[in-house]
Image: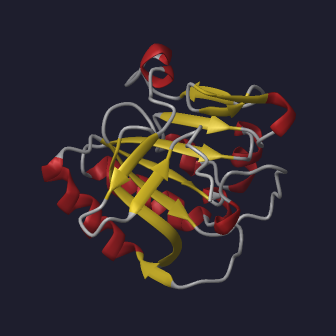
Amino acid sequence: MDARVHGIEPRSRANGPGVRFVIWLQGCTLGCPGCFNPLTHAAAGPTTPIAELVAQLAAAQGSGPEGLSLSGGEPMQQPAAALALLRAARALGMSTLMFSGYTLDEIRGIEPAVLAELDVLIDGRYVSTERHATGLRGSANQRIHLLTDRYTLAQVEATPVAEIRIGPTGELALTGVDPLKLKR
């Protein structure tokens, strides 16, 4: 099985509690006005074998990530890939978190098995008029669901709102629920 992947960040502190391995899946048809990640919306793009992503996840474990965060795009528009990645993270003993524009009830109708593999779900479409940008929620209507007792609400909400990583060749990675908007 393959997944359409927009990007990977092997060590993030702004996408869930602790240090996280983050995978942004490519493709979203929800069309939330003001979305921060419009480049993740197109469904077309190269695919990556799930086995390759799992190998990267396993290799990164030695450098500190305690968990996997799935984001997008919309992870639930690739439900089989999302489920496979979450199961692999669990098999590695990692925590799991997913951002989805779909609600908990909508996810139950798409692929309920995903919920059994999650510690934390941040759900709901982004509503720009209810911008919140803190505690891992982009807008006030979004909800944090603690689906296991692995984390407390305080731990989830203490996640930094943004981070900037400078790569070895000088490239910048901006991530989080309130990343800086650079002026050109």
Number of labelled discs? 0
In this view, 19 is above or below 146: below
Where is residue 30? Give x, y as percent: 81, 57
Where is residue 155? Give x, y as percent: 42, 19
Q: Residue at point 59% right, 37% down? A: 178
In this view, 114 is above or below 23: above
Colour convention: secondary structure
Residue 70 left/right relative to 128: left
Where is residue 34? Give x, y as percent: 79, 49
Please state which of residues 47 and 82 is positioned toward the viewer in this rendering: 47
Please state which of residues 101 and 51 is positioned toward the viewer in this rendering: 101
Q: Residue at point 71% right, 74% down? A: 42
Q: Residue at point 74% right, 40% down? A: 103
Q: Residue furthest front?
A: 184
Of the 4 image quadrants, the one containing the C terminus is bottom right
Residue 65 left/right relative to 130: left
Q: Residue at point 27% right, 40% down? A: 66
Where is residue 47? Give x, y as percent: 50, 82
Q: Quadrant of residue 145?
A: top right
